[in-house]
Image (cartoon, rainbow, N blue to C red):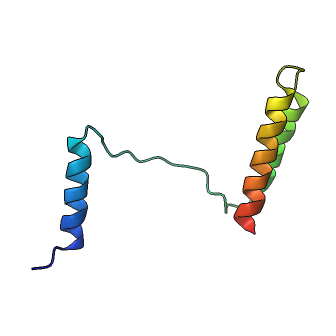
């Protein structure tokens, strides 16, 4: 007799719990929300304006990666 989807899911979850894991729910920003890209740019500008000699290279790398992620998401 075929196993239902619910049974497969429960079996998988039981195995994960037995391995010491537990399910969690997290909320993340909606990248499709109006204003999301502009808020990313605003925060990037704040970072750029707060750069020091020590943090400049690290901040620039983060900003570039963030902008690439936004661009590739919407392409």
Left or right of 42 in this view: 31: left
Measuring 38% from the left and 45% from the top, which residue is drawn there? 24
Task: Reply above or below: 5 against 61.
Answer: below
In the picture, the quarter occupied by the C terminus is bottom right
Residue at coordinates 76% horizontally, 39% vertically from top-left?
Answer: 62
Q: Is residue 39 visible to us here?
A: no
32 is higher (above) or lower (below) than 56: below
Quadrant location of residue 17?
top left
Measured along the vertical axis of the image, is residue 65 above or below residue 73? above
Residue at 19% of width from left, 74% of height from top? 4
| Count of numbered tags | 0
Say if residue 48 shows up in the picture.
Answer: yes
Q: Which residue is drawn at 75% across and 47% down?
A: 66
- Left or right of 67? Residue 26 is left
For residue 48, side relative to residue 17 (left or right): right
Quarter of the figure with residue 30: bottom right
- Residue 55, placed above or below residue 6: above
Return the x and y of residue 34 as percentages of the image width and height.
72, 61
Q: Where is residue 21 in the image (x, y as percent from the top left)?
A: 30, 40
Residue 37 point in image, percent of width and height: 77, 55
Quadrant hosting residue 72: bottom right
In which quadrant of the rendered image does the N terminus lie? bottom left
Query: Going by the picture, which residue comes out furthest to the left?
Result: 1
Q: Position of residue 13 (x, y in %)?
A: 25, 53
């Amino acid at each position: 007799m075929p196993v239902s989807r619910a049974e497969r899911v429960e079996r998988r979850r039981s195995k994960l719990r037995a391995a010491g894991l537990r399910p969690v729910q997290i909320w993340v920003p909606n990248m499709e929300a109006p204003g999301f890209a502009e808020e990313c740019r605003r925060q990037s500008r704040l970072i750029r304006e707060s750069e020091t000699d020590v943090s400049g290279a690290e901040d620039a790398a983060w900003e570039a990666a963030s902008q690439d992620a936004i661009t590739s998401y919407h392409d």
